[in-house]
Image (cartoon, coloured by chain):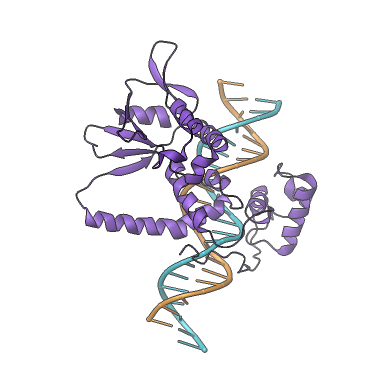
Chain colours: A purple, B cyan, C orange
Amino acid sequence: MYNMSTEKSTKEMKPVTTTHGLGLRKGAWTAHEDTLLKKCIEKYGEGKWNLVPLRAGLSRCRKSCRLRWLNYLRPNIKRGNFGEDEVDLILRLHKLLGNRWSLIAGRIPGRTANDVKNYWNTNIQPRSKQQKKESSDAKPMQNITTTVIKPKTLALTNTLNQCMDENPQIMAHGECSLIRTSNDDDNNNCDISFGLSSSPSILDDKGKEYFDDLFDDIEMEDGEYGWLFGGSPVAGQELNVVEQEDGQNQLFEFPMDEVAWKLID
DNA sequence: AAAGATCTCAACCGCAACGGC
DNA sequence: TGCCGTTGCGGTTGAGATCTT
């Protein structure tokens, strides 16, 4: 079911001889080029990509060298089909992070951002599009959208990485998500729901505490009310925190234009 | 068997973020 | 503070493989 011919390296592209204006090679890498690059990285380590072509004796641009290393030559890169657990993790992480392929790949050992992106674009996205189409055909009157909120990149990145490092069980079950559910576009209001878990038992106290802190409303220095997101106080106004009956989800209500300004900024 | 259509994925491109000066 | 070089990322492309007719 999930092994839709993602086998890699079964085809070897013929080397092309396209060159940049400066005589740099483009296109598929040869085995010789791979060897040179590998030796160079082993000797000097990763980084300083602008020096790599010179050090390795390659007529390639630094970008090409970096990409080849990260996506193909780096040790421990996993080849072959995505497992069911990997696909499940991708789906959950994508729900949480959106198209942050490098972040998603960082949580899937042996997989590169390019792998994840390609897999998503070729296998998952077409399926979800099809499902969306089918469900909209079935319920044409319903107008509910789900939007991944994108706060300041750095804040969210740090927050999620820290969270996942400290609470691996969260991502293992992957039931946490920050989503906007809106069926009320006319007056520009929405609900933001932070679904912690479909099963309370999978999130331990430490995990719950973490997410509680993440959305703590706090007193700002100037007396203005705000809330914490990614460890940074963000000026805000009225913030309604509602614990649902099931005790798992918390809803925050405020005007959408405020949200966009504060979180995307 | 051949031709055309579709799929896969390595590689490229453009841009934003970052750091040093 | 602004400029410039570097790095890293996501979107897109296109060559080759595979499937379909």
Q: Residue most toward the right?
A: A43
Task: Looking at this view, name the residue that lies furthest to the top.
Answer: A222
Quarter of the figure with residue A225: top left
Task: Count the numbered circles shown.
Answer: 0
Query: Is A261 on the left or on the right of A113, as rendered?
Result: left
Q: Nearer the viewer, residue A163 or C20?
A: A163
From this view, report whether residue A68 is shown above or below residue A222: below
Position of residue A32 relative to residue A150, above or below, is: below
Q: Is residue A57 visible?
A: no
Which quarter of the figure is the N terminus of chain A placed in?
bottom left
Eyeballing the image, is A159 above or below A147? above
Relative to A222, residue B4 above or below: below
* Residue with the most extreme front position: A201
Residue drawn at x 42%, y 27% as measured from the top left: A215
Q: Position of residue A110 (x, y in %)?
A: 61, 52
x and y percent of residue A209 in the render?
Answer: 47, 28
Name the residue rendered at 37%, 31% in the picture. A260
Q: Position of residue A65 (x, y in %)?
A: 68, 51
- In percent of width and height, residue A148 lies at 39, 40
The reply to whether residue A79 is visible in this rendering is yes
Q: Quarter holding the C terminus of chain A?
A: top left
Horizontal side, residue A231 vs residue A236: left or right: right
